[in-house]
Image: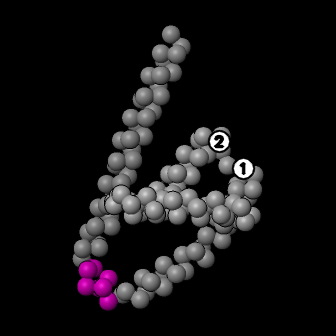
Amino acid sequence: MIRALAILLLCQLAGTVLQQAFGLPMPGPVLGFVLLVAVFLYRGGPGVELRETSQGLLKHMGLLFVPAGVGVVGELGVLKQNALALIIAIPLSTVLGLVVTGVIMQWFMRRAGNQAGSADA
């Protein structure tokens, strides 16, 4: 379990270092996740220990949101000041995200269909 947690934290650290070093507009933990996925693709997936540790963390994911919830409650004044912008931005960004995801998914599905069709021929 310690080794698995160390792998997860090292990937997050590497992502944060890359983000800071290159000034990338993406959060370091997201870059760390991309690195972790790249490692999985190279190695053929996560090991048993990492899989079990990750599943254990996911079971208690709700606890990981408590600090974020406390932070939101601590900033209620700022949220009230920007309520109109938030009321517009949240649904708009959600719809935009769904549309972009759908377009990309259809593109990948068409591409996979074309490759399957050319493999059958």
In the picture, the quarter occupied by the N terminus is bottom right
Residue 87: image location, x then y, percent? 29, 72
Q: Which residue: 69% across, 60% down?
A: 4
Per the rendering, the mark at residue 22 is none
Q: Is residue 43 above or below residue 93?
A: above
Whole-number angstrom distance, CA of label 2 to CA of label 1: 9 Å
Do residues under tags 2 and 1 come within 8 Å of each other at their CB atoms? yes
Q: What kind of secondary structure does the magenta stretch mostly adopt?
A: helix
Residue 20: image location, x then y, percent? 39, 64
Quarter holding residue 83: bottom left
Q: Which residue is mark 2?
A: 43
Number of other residues with Cα within 10 Å of mark 1, as a class: few under 14, some 14 to 19, many 20 or more: few
Q: Which residue is mark 1?
A: 47
Let me know if residue 107 appears in the view.
yes
Residue 84: image location, x then y, percent? 24, 76
Report if residue 81 lies within the magenta region: yes
Q: Is residue 82 above or below residue 117?
A: below
Let me know if residue 30 appears in the view.
no
The residue segment tinted magenta is 77-83
At mark 2, the secondary structure is helix
Say which amino acid is labelled 1.
Answer: Gly
- Does 28 sit left or right of 50 as displayed? left
Q: Which residue: 48% across, 18% down?
A: 117
- Does 25 sit left or right of 15 as displayed? left
Q: Residue furthest top?
A: 121
Say which amino acid is labelled 2.
Answer: Arg
Q: Is residue 1 above or below residue 79?
A: above
Q: Which residue: 58% across, 74% down?
A: 64
- Does 11 sit left or right of 78 as displayed? right
